[in-house]
Amino acid sequence: MQHLHAYWRMDYIETPKNPAGPDPFTALPAMADDAAARIIHRGQLHYIVLNRFPYNAGHLLVVPFREVSDLPSLTPPERDELMALIVFAQEVLQAALKPDGFNIGFNLGAAAGAGIPKHLHAHIVPRWTGDTNFMPVLGQTRVLPQSLDIMYQRLHSVVSELLARRA
C-alpha cells in the first residue's frame, strides 16, 4: 500500500469557515515578505496570490487591496486592473505550467461558496485533460503534485520574465 501525504490539508480543515477576525486578504499584502504571503505580483490596486487551499496545482487569486464584496462596488480603474491581472495570471500559468485549459471565475456571497464573502477575489485555476480522478470523487481529497513553496518560486520567476519582456 502506498501513502498519500497532504500535510497542508489539516490547516484547511482546522481553519474557521466563517472567520470573524481580520480579513486575511488585507493582511497578506501588509506582510513584509511576499514569498511568505505567496504574493507573486502586486499591481496598483490588486495583487496576485497563490491560493493557500488550491483546487488544483497553480491555483491563483486576483484580489483587490481594498476590501470590497461585490463587482458593482469596484471603481472603474479597479475593474480595469482586475481584468488585466486576471489575463496576466492566465499568461503566467500558461508559461509556467502549460495547462490544457482554465477555470476562471468568482464566488460572490456565502451562498455561492465564497469562503471570505466580504472580500471578492477572482480564481484562475489551471486544468489539464484528465486531471479529475477518483480522489476528489471517492476520497474528497485533491492530489497536488508540487508544494506551495515550490509552486510560488516557479510562478514568481515567470512573472519576472514576463514583466522584463514587456519593459
Image: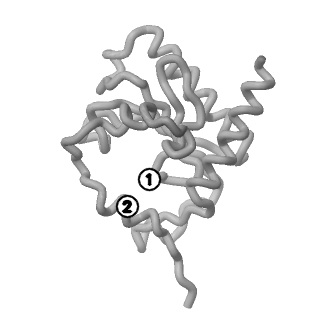
Q: Which colour scheme is used?
A: one colour
Label 1: how many Cα within 10 Å (few below 14, some 14–19, many 20+): few
Q: Quadrant of the N terminus?
A: bottom right
Q: Please identify the quarter of the rendering in which residue 138 is found.
A: bottom left
Going 49% across and 69% down the picture, which residue do you hit? 6
Report which residue position mark 1 lands on: 53
Q: Please identify the quarter of the rendering in which residue 29 is found.
A: top left
Q: Give the label on residue 164, or none.
A: none
Residue 130 percent across, percent down from the top left: 62, 60
In depth, the one of 10 and 2 nearer the eye is 10
Report which residue position mark 2 lands on: 11
In depth, the one of 108 and 65 nearer the eye is 65
Mark 2: amino acid = Asp
Q: Residue furthest front?
A: 32
Residue 31 percent across, percent down from the top left: 45, 36
Residue 103 appears in the picture as rendered: no
Mark 1, secondary structure of its residue: loop
Tell me if residue 95 comes above or below residue 137 in the rendering.
above
Contact? badges 2 and 1 (CB < 8 Å):
yes
In depth, the one of 9 and 98 nearer the eye is 9
Residue 10 appears in the picture as rendered: yes
Tell me if residue 30 comes above or below residue 7 in the rendering.
above
Marks 2 and 1, the one that precedes in the sequence: 2
Q: Mark 2 or mark 1, which is nearer to you?
A: 2
Tell me if residue 47 comes above or below residue 127 in the rendering.
above
The answer to whether residue 160 is left or right of residue 104 is right
